[in-house]
Image: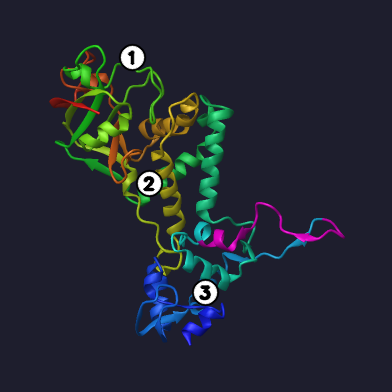
């Protein structure tokens, strides 16, 4: 029966292992009647369900959020069409809006698209109500464009323009992204050696402001931050250029509250009833954390592309009122699964480093050891 349906290009039977989504796996198990999966060919007693049952579940969860779009003519007498930018194809619906990205499973994707309607287009059930994560992403995109191309130094003086940063801050608190690195935490810095060896705490720590001439991910020229990684290989890979490097292990001497963008929860299933309210916020945070960590080519546009993250860093350093943060942790752009840290620490934060005002807690980073590697 199943094989015949497949050959006739009717809807196939699928098993739970075809789906990456735990909630859709459950739907398959609840409706399983066949002994063979048409997609992966696995056999067993009552392991496969008709894909129509999965699609009916998907449609039920879409209700109230998305609906099939009906084309209408732009003008009387013209052929009906969809308004550009307001509808999605069925495959876009699956991976962009429902978070069911099965592009690496082409048989399943094709079967789902056929079952939902390959030629259909989909729209918001209420065009006036954006999903929360789309609204947040739109606000952030507007902020990035404004900060790059319209107004930079006085933008945040307008309360309306602070909304993207303030909403980001609230969600970081809600989902537990504020954590404290304990005293004794160790981080690795790498500095390329040119004409002489870097050996002292002053050499190996962050430069003084007048020497911080490069635009970085979290800091503009003239603002010195302590950039480091959790391990030696990540510190080297973040440098990207070949050469001989001085590596230094530093110890944090006091509890250090940081914004940890590596702790964004996994995006829950669209079909998980317990996560219906929180999912949009997590989607936004995941998109934001990914954007912070993406590689940026070091060309003439590097200064422009770094501006939004530099302003975001300044907000969390100076304007975030809930916790006095001392750094940001983010995923390495060069090594998947590894972590980098930007501490709000300049040259005078290092014990034995550059001279500065001797105030309590000013010196809170200590050089532990130094070695060399060629990359």
Above or below, 295 against 72 in this view is above
Q: Which residue is the site of mark 1? A: 211
Q: Are marks 2 and 3 in contact (CB under 8 Å)?
A: no
Q: Sequence-wise, which precedes: disc 2 or disc 1?
A: 2
Q: Secondary structure at mark 3?
A: helix
Above or below, 254 against 202 in this view is below
**CA neighbours of label 1 inside 10 A, class few (<14), some (14 to 19), many (20+):** few
Above or below, 302 against 159 in this view is above
Q: Position of residue 94 (x, y in %)?
A: 52, 62
Judge from the rendering whether residue 36 lies leftward or rightward of residue 122; answer left or right: left
Task: Name the mark nearer the viewer: 3 or 1.
Answer: 3
Q: Are marks 3 and 1 in contact (CB under 8 Å)?
A: no
Name the residue located 28 percent from the left edge and 18 percent from the top edge. Answer: 207
| Closer to the camera in the image, 31 or 312 | 31
Name the residue located 56 percent from the left edge and 80 percent from the top edge. Answer: 8
| Segment colored magenta | 75-94
């Amino acid at each position: 029966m199943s094989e015949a349906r497949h050959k006739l290009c009717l809807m196939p039977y699928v098993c739970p292992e075809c789906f990456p989504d735990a909630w859709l796996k459950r739907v398959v198990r609840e409706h399983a009647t066949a002994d063979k999966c048409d997609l992966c060919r696995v056999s067993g007693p009552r392991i496969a369900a008709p894909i129509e049952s999965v699609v009916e579940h998907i449609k039920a969860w879409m209700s109230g959020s998305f609906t099939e779009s009906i084309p209408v003519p732009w003008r009387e007498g013209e052929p009906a069409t969809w308004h550009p930018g307001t509808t999605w194809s069925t495959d876009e619906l699956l991976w962009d809006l429902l978070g069911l990205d099965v592009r690496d499973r082409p048989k399943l994707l094709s079967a789902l698209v056929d079952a939902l309607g390959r030629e259909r287009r989909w729209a918001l059930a209420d065009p006036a109500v954006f999903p929360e994560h789309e609204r947040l992403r739109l606000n952030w995109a507007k902020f990035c464009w404004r900060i790059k191309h319209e107004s930079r130094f006085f933008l945040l003086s307008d309360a309306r323009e602070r909304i993207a940063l303030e909403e980001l801050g609230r969600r970081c608190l809600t989902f537990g992204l504020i954590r404290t690195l304990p005293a004794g935490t160790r981080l690795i810095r790498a500095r390329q050696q040119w004409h002489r060896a870097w050996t002292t705490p002053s050499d190996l720590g962050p430069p003084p402001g007048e020497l911080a001439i490069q635009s970085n991910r979290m800091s503009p020229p003239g603002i010195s931050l302590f950039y480091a990684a959790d391990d030696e290989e990540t510190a080297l890979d973040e440098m990207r250029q070949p050469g001989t490097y001085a590596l230094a292990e530093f110890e944090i001497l006091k509890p250090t509250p940081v914004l940890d963008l590596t702790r964004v929860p996994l995006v829950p299933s669209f079909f998980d009833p317990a996560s219906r309210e929180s999912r949009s916020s997590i989607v936004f945070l995941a998109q934001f954390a990914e954007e912070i960590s993406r590689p940026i080519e070091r060309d003439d546009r590097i200064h422009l592309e770094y501006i939004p993250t530099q302003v975001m860093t300044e907000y969390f350093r100076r304007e975030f009122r809930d916790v006095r943060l001392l750094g940001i942790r983010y995923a390495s752009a060069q090594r998947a699964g590894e972590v980098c840290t930007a501490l709000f620490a300049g040259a005078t934060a290092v014990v034995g480093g550059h001279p500065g005002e001797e105030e309590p807690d000013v010196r809170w980073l200590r050089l532990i050891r130094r070695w060399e590697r060629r990359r």
